[in-house]
Image (spheres, rainbow, N blue to C red):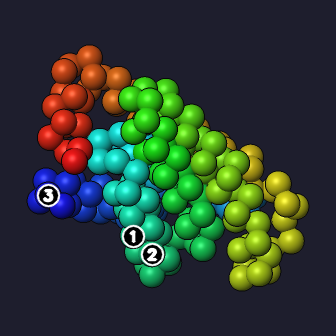
Amino acid sequence: MSVKKLSLAGILVAVGVVCSTFYIPIGVSKVFPVQHFINVLAGVILGPAYAVTMAFTTSILRNVMGTGSLLAFPGSMCGALIAGLLYKYTKKLGAAFLGEVTGTGIIGAILAYPIAAQFLSSKVAFYGFVIPFSISSLAGAVLSITLLISLKKAGILQKLISSEQI
């Protein structure tokens, strides 16, 4: 574990928490594109383990502060994990993008249903989270890929990855 990785992870978690006041209400869920932006950045630069840990930490802090909900856990963590794993094994930014959108928009949304039904007394249809989660993850992933492509063209991305990856 390096100090650089922990520092960057801490900064990204802080950005996720501070920006959690910015959300878009869609149906019964609040969509946080900034979280998905951070998930892809973390998955590419720091790797899947850091990305999932950061998503979990951000979700806990947002819930403690009252700016998030229990639905933040499955959505953010699934997206971060799949984005990080797909990038790790393909080294393609597009794979990280697809991992975030699929992980959050489909898998996280499906996993959110029992949480909403059990703990939030929500009677949303089984697939009722797929559209809002997909919109949120798509917006955040587009922003992150735009930044990552710019960093790659400037020659900065590879330096960040090589200095951060184990």
Vertically, is 150 above or below 7? above
Q: Element type at marker 2?
A: helix
Residue type at mark 3: give it. Ser
Residue 42's tag is none
Give the residue number, with chain letter if any, for mark 2.
60
From the viewer's perspective, is the residue at label 3 or at label 2 nearer?
A: 3
**Which residue is at a point 24% across and 30% down the rendered structure image?**
157
Quadrant of image for the N terminus: bottom left
Give the residue number, with chain letter if any, for mark 3.
2
Residue 57's tag is 1
Q: Residues within 10 Å of mark 1 (few under 14, many from 20)?
A: some
Mark 3 vs mark 2: which is more N-terminal?
A: 3
Residue type at mark 2: give it. Ile
Task: Name the spot of residue 145 as percent of width and height, x first.
Answer: 42, 30
Report if the CB atoms under discs 1 and 2 are less than 8 Å apart.
Answer: yes
Q: Element type at marker 1?
A: helix
Q: Residue furthest left?
A: 3
**Which residue is at a point 22% across and 48% down the rendered structure image?**
166
Q: Residues within 10 Å of mark 3 (few under 14, many from 20)?
A: few
Residue type at mark 1: give it. Thr
Q: Element type at marker 3?
A: loop
Is residue 142 visible in this depiction of the protein?
A: no
From the viewer's perspective, is the residue at label 1 or at label 3 nearer?
A: 3
Task: Name the spot of residue 135 as percent of width and height, x first.
Answer: 65, 42
**Which residue is at a point 56% across and 55% down the rendered structure image?**
78
